[in-house]
Amino acid sequence: SFRTVLRELTEGMIDPAISPGETLPDLDPSVFHKRYLKELRELGEGHFGKVTLYLYDPANDGTGERVAVKALKQENGHVPDGWIKEIEILKSLYHSNIVKYKGCCTEMGGQVVQLIMEYLPLGSLRDYLPKRKLGVPQCLMFAQQICQGMEYLHSKRYIHRDLAARNVLVENDNLVKIGDFGLTKYIPEGEIYYRVREDGDSPVFWYAIECLKESKFSFSSDIWSFGVTLYEILTRCDHRQSPPVKFSEMMGATQGQMTVMVLIKLLEKNLRLPCPKDCPHEVKLLMEQCWAADPTQRPSFRPLIEKLEAIRR
Ligand code: ADP
Ligand code: MG
């Protein structure tokens, strides 16, 4: 049950407010104590979470390690079951293209639980790509690594549901990792999953047609989102060509819930994002396969990995 999971996650954590001054041996490296976390700066904010960079410095001499800490944006007195579940998912994933779980930190006797993960200094692809002049082969290498992380995720029978450049983190010029596991899978009660956000950053533009029409998320709908992510990578995450901007140009001015209806109409007419400028023809074909209206016609990640590998060479 969630209670048991929460207990397991937070076992051994002693709230400093309860036992002041007491130092206990830290046997579990996944237990992070709030009092040793020094806030450095805000890293980013998404739909439901907020990520902050901290120095975890138990020695209190500045020698600690930098960690990324994710907290739910609104917490009112209890830990939502969905949030604990998502922490459990990340904890169970081990792959070179998936961000590493490091541990948890609880406050107020378990009323607040934060997720501690490794810090990736180059931020998301959206922070990284516009600043570099990446060639097509390197773009395709990143795309292939995303496929590798996703193939692993699917092999564990999880679906991501929010694959997008903003959720892919950059370790260095040769390595990317998928971050943000399914915080979006957890939908606060009363929240409409594909609610259109006013800041133009709504995930609907990454959704497969069946997700928009029937809220049907599947392994194949992750493939569609990968196609959109591939498009973002090849446009080097240029804001002027972002999926929301491009789709809005095709749709004309619409508002609120209308957006989803107009978007469905457009996709039903087989309209898709344009081919990025220096995108090779074979890659354009891959994107089109990912965006097949019929989910069964879309490839899975294994053949995508092989095709990207072949195109790269
Ligand atoms: P949300 O679930 O709210 O969308 P994310 O996990 O996507 O939150 O994090 C929001 C942003 O914070 C990301 O787009 C990225 O810029 C930054 N970020 C998240 N995790 C890390 C990390 N481990 N290292 C560096 N930056 C990160
Ligand atoms: Mg995110």
Image (cartoon, rainbow, N blue to C red):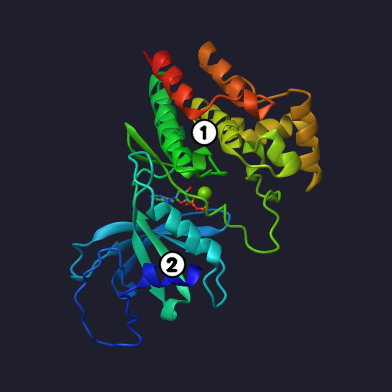
Residue found 53% across the figure and 43% down from its top: 159
Q: Does the rendering let one see residue 252? A: no
Q: Amino acid at mark 1?
A: Cys
**Residue 177 placed where, x, y %?**
39, 40
Residue found 42% across the figure and 20% down from its top: 306
Q: Is residue 34 above or below residue 191?
A: below
**Residue 68 placed where, x, y %?**
37, 56
Disc 1: which residue: 237
Q: Quadrant of residue 187?
A: bottom right
Q: Does the rendering let one see residue 5? A: yes
Residue found 52% across the figure and 28% down from its top: 300
Residue found 49% across the figure and 68% down from its top: 2
Q: Farthest residue toward the front?
A: 1
Badge 1: how crowded within 10 Å, few (<14), some, or many (20+)? many
**Residue 204 placed where, x, y %?**
67, 41
Whole-angstrom CA distance, mark 2 to mark 1, is: 38 Å
| Front: mark 2 or 1 | 2
Marks counted in the figure total: 2
Q: Amino acid at mark 2?
A: Val
Counting residues from the start of the chain, the first of labels 2 and 1 encountered is 2
Q: Is residue 171 above or below residue 182?
A: above
Q: Quadrant of residue 18?
A: bottom left
Q: The residue tagged with tag 1: helix, strand or loop?
A: loop
The disc at residue 5 is 2
Q: The residue tagged with tag 2: helix, strand or loop?
A: helix
Q: Quadrant of residue 87?
A: bottom left
**Residue 4 placed where, x, y %?**
44, 71
